Image (cartoon, rainbow, N blue to C red):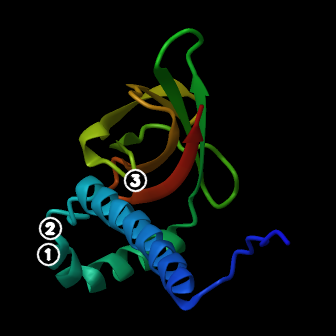
Amino acid sequence: MMAQSQRQLRGRHVLALALAFFAVVFAVNAVFIYLALDSFRGLSTDDAYVRGLDYNRTIAAAQAQQVLGWQARLESERVTGSNEVVLRLTIVDRDGAPIPGLSADGMLQRPVDDSMDRRLVFAAAGDGRYEARALVPQWGQWDVRLTARAPGGESYRLEQRLWLK
């Protein structure tokens, strides 16, 4: 009679499989932790304390803007064959009439990397429209933060997320 070789699952096999499983889980977690800590510097803003103290001033400015009744529309268009984008800003009063004579500037900011931030200066394009151009080193999500000021002292602040492609 021939002896048949049967594999039996023993306790040491189960232990080895469990240890191998957890070793893989720990290794993957270690890689993710390393990548997370290596890619994020931990600083979201240079002046967080000062901005926190200005909270009430920010709320008052938002209420004044709401009373002003201005509305803004921001559109973006990629310049064909380049890494340049044109941002078009239109600001209208509460009756829908364009507001001419504003000076507008701000920042085009990458949410994940402030080294890519670009300064924006809007130039009048007629009929209450304003344009700014910026070179964009990488396409994707960007935040626009801008302020438009009227000669009479009124101002309008806009913060908008754009998908540039």
Image height of 5 relative to 149, above or below: below
In this view, the residue farthest toward the top is 81
Q: Which residue sits at x=60%, y=55%? A: 93
Q: Residues within 10 Å of mark 1 (few under 14, many from 20)?
A: few
In x, y percent, where is residue 92? 61, 50
SS for callout 1: helix
Q: Is residue 18 above or below residue 104?
A: below
Q: CA distance from mark 1 to mark 2?
A: 5 Å
State the residue at coordinates (85%, 72%): 1
Q: Where, quadrant-wise, is the C terminus in this rendering?
A: top right
Q: Secondary structure at mark 3?
A: loop
- Residue at image mark 1: 50
Residue type (three-letter) at the residue carrying disc 1? Val
**Circle 3: residue type:** Pro
Q: Which residue is mark 3?
A: 111
Q: Position of residue 94 (x, y in %)?
A: 64, 61
- Between 133 and 3, the residue placed more toward the observer is 3
